Image (cartoon, helix red, strand yellow):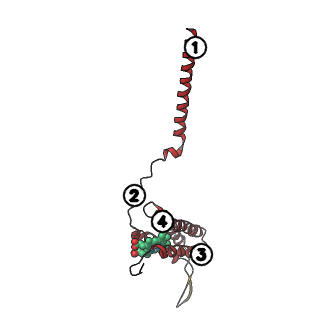
Amino acid sequence: MALTRLKDRANRHRQRRWSLLCLILLLGACDNPRGLQATDPPYRPVANPQQLMQWILDPAADVIWDSAGTIITAEGRQELAPTTSAGWESVSAAAITLSEAGNLLMLPGRSMGNDWQEYAQALVSAGEQAFKASESRDADGLFDAGGQIFQVCKACHAQYWIREGDGR
Ligand code: HEC
């Protein structure tokens, strides 16, 4: 009799230990921030690739290219770098726009092939480089970043922009 009661107590004790362990595991799961991010962010791409290019990437790239380097005019050599804070701020805004546009290109459903994400990543970096140059009012740095941006646009287009009449 005494022995069964002793066994009963041991069993109840074990059960309580299990409950405690389960509770700790549950709390642990709540503590894990990855667990909380289990659902995908509710993004909803709206622009088609052509609109993304024409209205987001192209205007932003133009701001940078029009603000870097020199041009030769009838009056002589003209530096394109901004001369006012407001001018530099527009360049910074365009650079950030391009950088983040790289992220937009990476959204699932937008990629058109294996190298796509690499070009998109390169755009994030080149845009960031332009942003840093602009923030430190570094005209030469902006010119270099502008060149890199151009290379990224060109490389992706060569591979993924199939123009009518290209015969591809
Ligand atoms: C990751 C690939 C990729 C990158 C990077 C990229 N493009 Fe494009 N671009 C495309 C594709 C694909 C098209 C064809 C879209 C279509 O017509 O459906 C295109 C088309 C365009 C067009 C033509 C849009 C029109 O009106 O028909 C312009 C302008 C353009 N891109 C500008 C740029 C500029 C500027 C950059 C760099 C700052 C750039 N793109 C970077 C993939 C890319």
> Which residue was labeled with disc 2?
44
Q: Which residue was labeled with disc 3?
A: 144
Percent x, y for residue 36? 49, 44
Q: Earlier in the sequence, mark 2 or mark 3?
A: 2
Q: Residue furthest top?
A: 1
Q: Amino acid at mark 4?
A: Ala
Q: Quadrant of ligand 1?
A: bottom left
Q: Amino acid at mark 3?
A: Asp
Whole-angstrom CA distance, mark 1 to mark 3, is: 81 Å
Marks 1/4: CA–CA distance? 70 Å
Question: Label 4, on which residue?
Answer: 101
Residue 141 sits in which quadrant? bottom right
- Ligand 1 within 8 A of label 4's CB? yes
- Foreground residue, 144 or 2? 2
Q: CA distance from mark 3 to mark 4?
A: 19 Å
Q: CA distance from mark 1 to mark 2?
A: 62 Å
Q: Which residue is mark 1?
A: 6
Do we see residue 62 in this rendering?
A: no
> Residue visible at 47% across and 67% down?
113
Identify residue type, mark 1.
Leu
Name the element at disc 4.
helix
